[in-house]
Amino acid sequence: MAAGGSVTEVPVDRTGAVSARAYGEALRPDTALACLQSANHEVGTVQPVAEVAEVCRAAGVPLLVDAAQSLGWGPVEGAWSLLTASAHKWGGPAGVGLLAVRKGVRFAAQGPVDERESGRSPGFENIPAIVAAAASLRAVRTEATEEALRLRELTERIRTLVPRSVPDVDVVGDPVRRLPGIVTFSCLYVDGETLLHELDRAGFSVSSGSSCTSSTLTPSHVLKAMGVLSEGNVRVSLPPGTTAEDVERFLAVLPGAVAGVREKLGAAAPVAVVEKDSLVVDALGKRCPIPVIELAKVIGDVPVGGTVRVLSDDEAARLDIPAWCEMRDQEYMGEEKADQGTAYLIRRLT
């Protein structure tokens, strides 16, 4: 950091959730601030804010909670110290941010200040926009409980039916502790960007954390931290007012869209040779999801207990190959340096 400090990242589990214990282990005597999202916008997982806040309170460390995704659905429980949010997330005016500082918490503005606004910020506040932000939050909160129940039913239908209608799909995020309108899944052997275009042509605007939708060719840091599949990742966000008919049409369109992308993408026969009793697949120069497709094509060619080495220089392979092994009940044995790229070692178990 610019001032000479350092950052300690707290790991998450496969659902994207942190634990209060992990926060306790990460806190140091010189920790100045702990930060936590109340809920993640990519996978919808809701975090144990109250439990983490208690650990931080016992350690004397203030906890800053980013409540942008969850505040429109209800209050953030627990003895947090600071809370931030953005009004446009609940339908309020864009450009209005919220910072709540609990009484008793020491706080000093980091930017320039003057004599106005009690020394909290320079110049005059946009009072009409602030009032509109508060009024819009109050309005959505009056309907939040009923709408949350309705959207949960719709997202649960997507979570349940997508794996039944589309082969090789991994639904990610916590199945219970999650935001009501978000559901995320990843489809094996699918290029994320191509799938998004297919769904867009069918009238559905969805998002993705796949590396193949990113200019950096690296997967979402959220999916990477969770250790789940990034290829063919689809995030469906159901805004308030979404109808059951909308969801049913999406469920009807998705299987054909995925099948069409898989057919178009079908990789050529993998380049594979046997070296030292291990089948070596050369996927150098090939991008997500081709390395995983080529691995899937050859895994049946080795005996149970045999190994496959996949050579790849695609950064996404470091995430997707272990995630594929988890999905397909194969053993991921780790990675090794290679003359070019990286060698990923897989043992066939089934």
Image: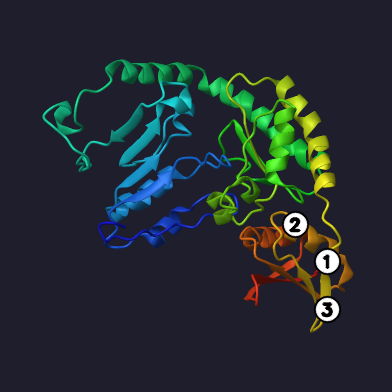
Q: Is residue 80 above or below residue 231?
A: above
Q: In which quarter of the view is residue 218 placed?
A: bottom right
Any mark on residue 299, and which? Answer: 1
Query: Does residue 157 show up?
Result: no
Please tell me whether mark 1 sits on a helix, a strand or a loop. Answer: helix
The residue positioned 69% from the left and 54% from the top of the image is 288
Is 191 situated left or right of 279 in this image?
left
Q: How many marks?
A: 3
Mark 1 neighbour density, 10 Å: few (under 14) some (14–19) many (20 or more): many
Is 234 situated left or right of 79 in this image?
right
Please tell me whether mark 2 sits on a helix, a strand or a loop. Answer: helix
Picture coordinates of residue 50, whole percent (x, y): 41, 43
Earlier-in-chain disc, 3 versus 1: 3
Question: Which quadrant would the C terminus be assigned to in this image?
Answer: bottom right
3D distance between C-alphas at marks 2 and 1? 14 Å
The residue positioned 63% from the left and 45% from the top of the image is 213
Q: Nearer the viewer, mark 3 or mark 1?
A: 3
Mark 2 neighbour density, 10 Å: few (under 14) some (14–19) many (20 or more): many
Amino acid on which disc 3 is placed: Val
Earlier-in-chain disc, 3 versus 2: 3
Question: On the image, numbered disc 2 is attached to which residue?
Answer: 290
- Judging depth in this view, the residue of 347 and 313 nearest the camera is 313
Query: Does residue 184 show up?
Result: yes
The residue positioned 61% from the left and 18% from the top of the image is 241
3D distance between C-alphas at marks 3 and 1? 13 Å
Any mark on residue 307, and which? Answer: none
Question: On the image, numbered disc 3 is attached to which residue?
Answer: 274
Q: Is residue 87 above or below residue 182?
A: above
Q: How is the image coloured?
A: rainbow
